[in-house]
């Protein structure tokens, strides 16, 4: 699997003006029959004083003011006494923290405001963020602002088991600029993937809202993220491997670009049949048979132009150690799809280099007529396209 990115930064802080949490203002009482001398400014904080399990995402801590302006706001980590930086609006009527908070940490938010007569009021909110034990983080792919192939799935891996699947799925939105219907599917209780019925339309923009902050994912365990990211779908490239012919036809936007001689898995180690999606790319990587349960059959420290197709270890990659006559004629690999290449991966004229340079994460690779490999499982990589649309929708919690 691609590294599924959702990083919780443990950030030291800096100073700022503004704040967040709770609501209220200075008391307004005055002796009966006498003019009120209390300030009219009212300060509201989010979260409120005494709150627990507070989300850690940027913008979760805020302060706002009515009938006045904010003069200073400080948010302090009570464990290390460091302030957290924040941003105050130009009108000085609101403030929010601009860095993620630390999990399981007590904070104090102090907001000071004044009314039109210059009278000041102070609001203090003391709260604790969700701890690592009682919070959940979702790691995701693809990356923000990336350009991907039409087969890309939006995939989330959650670091705690999910019991409230409906609440979690409801907190995530995936919207395509072309209006394609997008549905989520649960693989077990920690992985949730989204895709349309057919491949994404080339050129579309997909916007993802991850709004898990405060969502109870399981009893006593809360989400802590609130963010939006997007990616662009590039051209449509679909490569079809015919294991019977030992060839791969690369088709882009309906036109044949190239037919590449390949060597697929031997009958003893057949390549998976089915639709697979490139999920990672490595200019050069190590491949060790002990990591995939094949003993000491191979240990190659510098496999060039490797692109992952399954979580279990299937790649389409360059191969410099096999005789040139193998490609296009003999299935010799342990399940991967090999193309002729040069050691070190520096020769741009090889088939391995060409395919690497012309591929995106999210491009589709279809394998047919492979002997001994069976069909790839939908959750073995980003390969949910091997599940028909009705089965896919049946795995949704909504």
Image (cartoon, rainbow, N blue to C red):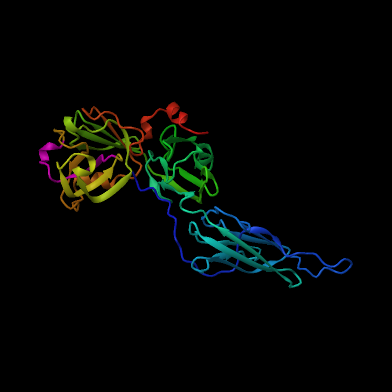
Pick the front one: 138 or 233: 138
Pick the front one: 261 or 10: 10
Does residue 170 appear to the left or right of 296 in the view shown? right
* Percent coordinates x, y for residue 142 in the rendering: 40, 46
Residue 145 seen in the current view:
no
* Percent coordinates x, y for residue 322 in the rendering: 12, 42
Q: Is residue 250 magenta?
A: no
Pick the front one: 65 or 176: 65
Q: Which residues are magenta?
A: 312-327
* Percent coordinates x, y for residue 256 in the rendering: 28, 36
* Percent coordinates x, y for residue 174 in the rendering: 49, 41
Does residue 336 appear to the left or right of 95 in the view shown? left
Residue 128's place in the image compared with 319, above or below, is below
Pick the front one: 12 or 78: 78
Furthest toward the bottom, the residue is: 118
Furthest toward the right, the residue is: 33
């Amino acid at each position: 699997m691609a590294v599924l990115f959702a990083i919780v930064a443990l950030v030291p802080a800096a100073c700022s003006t503004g704040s967040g949490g709770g609501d209220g203002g200075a008391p307004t009482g005055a002796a009966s029959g006498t003019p009120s001398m209390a300030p009219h400014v009212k300060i509201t904080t989010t979260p409120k004083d005494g709150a627990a399990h507070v989300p850690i995402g940027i913008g979760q801590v805020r302060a706002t003011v009515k009938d006045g302006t904010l003069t200073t706001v400080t948010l302090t980590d009570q464990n290390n006494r460091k302030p957290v930086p924040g941003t105050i609006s130009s009108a000085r009527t609101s403030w929010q923290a601009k860095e993620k908070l630390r999990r399981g940490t007590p904070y104090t938010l102090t907001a000071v405001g004044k009314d039109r007569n210059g009278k000041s009021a102070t609001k203090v909110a003391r709260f604790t963020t969700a701890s690592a034990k009682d919070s959940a983080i979702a790691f995701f792919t693809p990356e923000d602002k990336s350009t991907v192939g039409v087969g890309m799935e939006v995939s989330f891996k959650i670091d705690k088991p999910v019991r409230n699947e409906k609440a979690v799925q409801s907190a995530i939105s995936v919207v395509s600029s072309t209006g394609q219907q997008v549905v989520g599917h649960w693989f077990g209780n920690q992985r949730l993937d989204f895709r349309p019925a057919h491949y994404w339309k080339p050129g579309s923009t997909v916007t993802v809202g991850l709004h898990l902050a405060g969502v109870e994912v399981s009893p006593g365990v809360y989400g802590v993220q609130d963010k939006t990211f997007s990616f662009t779908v590039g051209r449509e490239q679909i490569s079809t491997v015919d294991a019977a012919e030992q060839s791969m036809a690369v088709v882009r936007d309906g036109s044949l670009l190239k037919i590449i001689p390949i060597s697929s898995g031997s009958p003893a180690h057949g390549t998976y049949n089915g639709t697979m999606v490139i999920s990672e790319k490595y200019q050069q990587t190590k491949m060790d048979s002990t990591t995939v349960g094949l003993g000491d059959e191979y240990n190659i420290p510098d496999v060039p132009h490797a692109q992952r197709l399954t979580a279990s270890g299937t790649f389409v990659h360059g191969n410099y150690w096999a005789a040139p006559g193998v490609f296009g004629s003999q299935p010799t690999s342990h399940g991967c799809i090999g193309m002729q290449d040069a050691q070190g991966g520096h020769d741009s004229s090889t088939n391995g280099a060409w395919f690497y340079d012309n591929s995106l994460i999210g491009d589709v690779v279809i394998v047919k007529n492979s002997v001994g490999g069976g069909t790839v499982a939908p959750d073995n990589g980003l390969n949910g396209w091997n599940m028909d649309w009705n089965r896919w929708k049946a795995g949704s919690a909504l």
